[in-house]
């Protein structure tokens, strides 16, 4: 039997063993899925005097990929989110208040379990903390 002919093309995206070049849609899908970072600095000097420095950082991805990487500034920006600065501040205040309440609850559990420097053995303190945590969860 003869081996099938291998097509070799020399275009951008072509690889070894006749792999077909990726279409623009494939490349765009891969970039949006994984993300791409382009970084560069432009410095303008005249007679060894720095007049201008531009630091460019470009991140291209889908919104979902950006959120996964912690880049979701548009969701907090009043211009893009449609929320007023006052509403955003109220949301932050509510979140801080909820965190402080949770911290107070945890400190109370630690104090009641004797984990705040008391004389309980570690096993007993751990058991007490588990019981108090379970007890606290049943009240919520």
Image: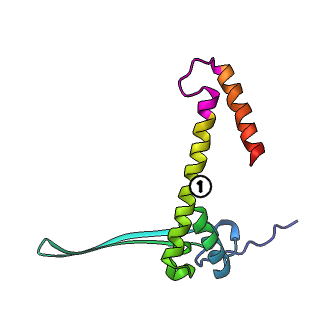
* Total marks in image: 1
The image position of residue 41, as x and y in percent, is 33, 70
| Number of other residues with Cα within 10 Å of mark 1, as a class: few under 14, some 14 to 19, many 20 or more | few
> Between 91 and 13, which is closer to the camera in this rendering?
91
Q: Which residues are magenta?
A: 110-122
The structure residue drawn at horizontal position 67% and vertical position 74%, both measured from the top left corner, is 8
Above or below 68: residue 132: above
Task: Provide the residue designation for mark 1.
Answer: 98
The image position of residue 101, as x and y in percent, is 59, 50
The structure residue drawn at horizontal position 61% and vertical position 73%, both measured from the top left corner, is 63
Classified by dominant secondary structure, the portion drawn in magenta counts as: loop
Above or below 53: residue 103: above
Mark 1, secondary structure of its residue: helix
In this rendering, does residue 60 appear at all? Answer: no
In this rendering, does residue 81 appear at all? Answer: yes
Among the 4 quarters of the image, the one containing residue 70: bottom right
Q: Is residue 86 magenta?
A: no
Q: Is residue 116 magenta?
A: yes
The image position of residue 134, as x and y in percent, is 75, 38
Residue 136 as seen in the image, left or right of residue 65? right
The image position of residue 34, as x and y in percent, is 61, 66
């Amino acid at each position: 039997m003869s081996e099938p002919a291998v097509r070799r093309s020399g275009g951008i995206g072509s690889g070894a063993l006749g792999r077909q070049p990726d279409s623009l849609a494939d490349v765009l899908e891969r970039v949006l899925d994984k993300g791409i970072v382009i970084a560069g600095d432009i410095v303008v000097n005249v007679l060894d005097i720095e007049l201008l420095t531009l630091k460019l950082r470009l991140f291209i991805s889908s919104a979902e990929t950006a959120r996964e990487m912690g880049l979701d500034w548009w969701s907090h920006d009043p211009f893009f989110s449609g929320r007023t600065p006052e509403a955003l501040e109220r949301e932050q205040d509510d979140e801080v208040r909820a965190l402080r309440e949770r911290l107070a609850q945890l400190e109370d559990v630690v104090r009641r379990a004797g984990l705040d420097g008391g004389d309980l053995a570690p096993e007993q303190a751990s058991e007490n903390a588990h019981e108090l945590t379970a007890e606290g969860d049943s009240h919520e």
